[in-house]
Amino acid sequence: MDTLQKFLRELARLPKGSRRRYSNRLKALAISHVDSVTGRGGTQGQAARELGVNPNSLRQWRTELEVTNVSVQPVTVISDESYMVFGPGGLRVECRSAEAVARLFSALS
């Protein structure tokens, strides 16, 4: 069963109304469908129509899921005065002090 069918099946279980509460699992299914459609040359708008969801909601969900899926990875110390922090998606941040790393994590949490 593809992601569109899974999404629609789970969506049918939600109470009807204009202010539905979508779970992170349902949002992830929707984003997976968008990725599938755009990977085949389609558009996010096309995927949104298939899902019955506003395209702006899909963009917001992607951002929410990216933020909630951030994980802390081990830090490699390059020298006594430099720290590298690796994040999801190949993100790399270099900091000059342990305090800067702490401030970074504090700002992200």
Image (cartoon, rainbow, N blue to C red):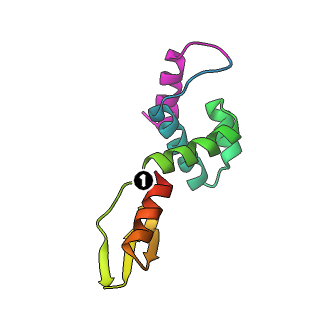
Residue 83 rendering spot, x and y as whole percentages: 37, 77
Residue 34 rendering spot, x and y as whole percentages: 58, 45
Which residue is found at the position 71% from the left and 43% from the top?
Answer: 45
Quarter that holds the N terminus? top left
Which residue is found at the position 53% from the left and 22% from the top?
Answer: 11
Q: Compared to 15, does 36 lie above or below?
A: below
Q: Residues within 10 Å of mark 1 (few under 14, many from 20)?
A: few
Viewer-proximal residue among 52 and 71 = 71
Side of 87 relative to 32 (left or right): left
Side of 19 relative to 64 (left or right): right
**Disc 1 marks which amino acid?**
Val
Query: Number of labelled discs?
Result: 1
Which residue is found at the position 50% from the left and 45% from the top?
Answer: 65
Which residue is found at the position 52% from the left and 36% from the top?
Answer: 27
Q: Compared to 9, does 39 lie above or below?
A: below
Q: Compared to 94, does 69 lie above or below?
A: above
Viewer-proximal residue among 37 and 61 = 61
Secondary element at image label 1: loop
Residue 101 rendering spot, x and y as whole percentages: 41, 68
Q: Compared to 98, does 8 lie above or below?
A: above
Is 57 inside the magenta-drawn segment?
no
Q: Quadrant of residue 18?
A: top right
Q: From which residue to which does the magenta span run?
A: 1-17
Residue picked out by circle 1: 70
Q: Please tell me whether the stretch drawn in magenta is mainly helix, strand or loop.
A: helix
Viewer-proximal residue among 79 and 54 = 79
Is 2 inside the magenta-drawn segment?
yes
Viewer-proximal residue among 66 and 27 = 66
